[in-house]
Amino acid sequence: MIISAERKQSIERAVADPKLQLAVYSATARLKQKRVEAVSPAELPDYQQLRECAHQLKKHALENLDYYLEQFEANVLAHGGKVIFAQTGKQVGEFIATLAKQRGVSLLVKSKSMTTEEIHLNEALEREKLEAVETDLGEYILQLAHERPFHIVAPAVHKTRHDVADILSQKLGVQREEVPEHQAMIARRTLREKFLAAGIGISGANFLVADSGAVVLVENEGNARLCVSAPPIHVAVAGIEKIIPRAQDLPVFLKLLARSGTGQRLTVYTSFLSGPRRAAEVDGPSEFYVVLMNNGRTKLLADSSKRESLFCIRCGACLNACPVYRKIGGHNYPWAYSGPIGAIITPQYQGLSQDPWLPYASSLCGACAEVCPVKIDIPRILLELRHEVTREERRQGKNGLERFAFRAYSWVMRKPKLYAAAGRAAALGARLPGMLSLGPARLWASQRETPKPAAASFRQLWRQRQAGRLP
Amino acid sequence: MYGRVSLFVTCLVDQLFPNVGLAVADVLERLGYQVEFRPQQTCCGQPAFNSGYREEAQAVAEHFIRVFRDADFIVVPSGSCTSMITHHFFELFPAGSDLREEVEYLAPRVWEFSKFLLEVAKVEDVGARFEGVVTYHDSCHALRELGIREGPRRLLAKVRGLTLREMSIAEECCGFGGTFSIKFPEVSAGMARTKIESILKTGASTIVSIDSSCLMQLQGVIARMGVPLETKHLAEILASR
Amino acid sequence: MNGRDALLAEVRQALGRQKGQAPPPPPPPRIVIPELSLPQRLALFRSRLEELGGKVLEVPTLAAARQAVAELLDGPAVASNSLVLAKAGIPSLPRVVSGLRDAAALREACRNAAYGITSADFALAETGTLVLMASAQEDRLVSLLPPVHIAVVPVSRLLSGLDELYNRKAKPAEETSAMILITGPSRSADIEMILVRGVHGPRLVQVIFVDEDVE
Ligand code: SF4
């Protein structure tokens, strides 16, 4: 496993930053606790059945994805919308920029979407001289601060209200305001004008419903509703993996999503959107586009042993549960997706050689899999990825020392006498047993005291015990 | 109830915490079991498996299978090593591979110590006495892969003189994670500190676990922090009188 | 090959599927409808919505609903074109704008209103939710732009929960371009996990259940 010096230092800085640690630990602890209550047997007796059902539905939808994509497309068309298939993030940006120019639009409003974060859509639109404004409160603050989301559900969880006060007063020129409620009202006022002036509203999609051609959005603030109701054009950008077969499958997913993410029974708003405003309807967008994006997803789809990585409904529960995420924070994950889910999908999308350390940044405690509402076996996938890393390193002749150590380990562990002798030698010589060479021992001791080697090994003591020589 | 039990003490206990192995043997013998130790045993292969070296792990696992293939009960004082054998051996030897059948035969014979006491020996009270206030640390693999949560607490509840106080985050990881502890030492130790701070609030003076690896990690950080806590394996508590 | 066909071909290749190959049957829908009497549904709805900071009134007649709304209003209001509101005579209350069929005019009215008044197609007891389907009667903005949302709902529309809703509306898209579920007032906890209401949508949701049917 290889990690860059910058990344290592950045991780060390995060762990040593008390302000960050407090902000992240307390927020995630709260979300964690709220989830536990929301899925408790008293509150949701069939929680485990719902998880299993959600897993099976996702599995079925993805195993037959081409069928459901076509069904989805046909239904969107039938309701007067359009579907765009995009192989790359770049194509998504190009489509939206072209559409904006054709319609004479220069201002776009956006609701929170990890998919558009993944492809840096805002930057792409900015390069085309288009103004794309994030409207989720947390995302808006981060856009002003030029930062990326720290958490997939609570994007600005690392910011204190004092940070927010600084950002708002510096970027908007408003008076410094320390109270979150007042800060939110500043955002409400500023963004309200943007909603009403924007020519295009961009959203992501929590679910794409095949039998309805519908985009489902869940949110709490109402900004997504505004994005898809006020402007004359709605463009939804979604990864192809967001498909579920039927509208009737939504209760299963909706019951799990908010409870797992924030501990709510349901988010404040759930929008089921199928096409542009219809003839009799009073308002709503007159144009409706769904951009179905690949951007590497077919690569994950092809690998049946890790395909379930695509089941993710982005609830964020695994981040809150993850002791490593809670220490190193969201910005130390190299891609848009952080936490356990980020650790398994980033290497699959971006290639293993980019950040081979990611699957190793885990104690394999399994807390993520325990809370995942769609039952993704994240630890198993981490282990698979580690295996792939070592194979890749072997091919490239990298990380030779570690490889040698494990080869030696494997050899010695099949030779009991040698193992016993080596163990004793290590106990006498270095202070840690077996294969830990000086390097590992030093790394251990950098943070903690080294256990005192036992005067005799168990096998030695056992012989004495059997001979009646132990007290 | 009397039968032969074969100990797999794990390499960590063998080399660093031999008293844990002796304690397991003491408890089992007091219950009437005949306890054997097969000196050919070494390790379960987990360090290599968890680091991504599957071929290396497989070789060690094969050795394990050869050593224990004819044992009726294999008792292990570690949730993590138990789970390696009962769960991950299946990944090392997928359906169709040579040793698959042996793994299928062996896995149900492998018992984590506390689970063996409760489900095979069917005892809760082993007649132990331990004066002190303890807290129980759920080790991750025992908890999440083997579903061990109440068992060790039930055993502790029957120990005379012992008071069990729960910490608020008993189920959070101690940060050990095998090579994770040296690949990310700051993160790993940070996790242990969080845990220890929560333990200190309970007023307990002893941390009990069924995994020596967690205890080694916690003990190492406790010593570095200089706080008055000690660590004990469940077997050591149950063996004391 | 165009982008669409190329992407679908890639998906098929990844899955080892053929073009036009039918999928195996999906797992059956999981719809579990609890048995709840009307008083139980009402009590549950009330406790759920109140927990979220919303308010619930129960009135016997449409006339009483009109009276209740009149007492709540203390500023300009917009009412949707809902039949329920019309039957209750709410559009004729002072300071209430209604009957808007032009999107631009509606938007202007909503922007300046202190109250948005709608009915709802359904309400869901288990979550304290209002269900609004966009139509000639219910638009999208009245329940969204004004800072207070008042919904007058015949109690016969109060269902147990999500499962019952999707059991009745297995394909909402056949009827509407937008089915919106509203569960309490707009909220955010994006800053230090401190709850703020009314971030973009209404800060208050007031539901008035009427024990009188319109049809
Ligand atoms: S992996 Fe599971 S727990 Fe994590 S965000 Fe996705 S759905 Fe939620």
Image: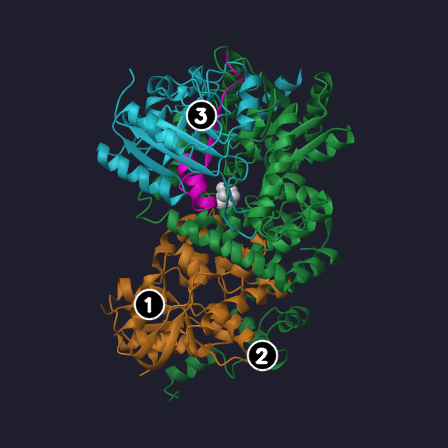
Q: Residue C120, which numbered label?
A: none
Sequence order check, earlier mark of 3 and 2: 3
Residue indicated by mark 3: A245
- Quadrant of the image for the C terminus of chain A? bottom left
Local crowd size for mark 1, using a 10 Å CA cut-off: few (<14), some (14–19), many (≥20): some
Magenta-drawn stretch contains A262: yes
Magenta-drawn stretch contains A143: no
Q: Give the CA distance from mark 3 to mark 2.
A: 60 Å
The front one of A129 and A385 is A129
Q: Secondary structure at mark 3?
A: loop
Kind of residue sitting beneath label 1: Arg
Residue indicated by mark 2: A427
Residue indicated by mark 1: B153
Give coordinates of residue A90: x percent, y percent: 71, 29
Q: What residue is drawn where x is 56% and y is 27%? A: C111
Report the number of discs: 3
Q: Give the CA distance from mark 1 to mark 3.
A: 45 Å
| Residue range (magenta) | A252-278
> Is residue A318 toward the left or the right of residue A114 in the image?
left
Give coordinates of residue A368: x percent, y percent: 49, 50
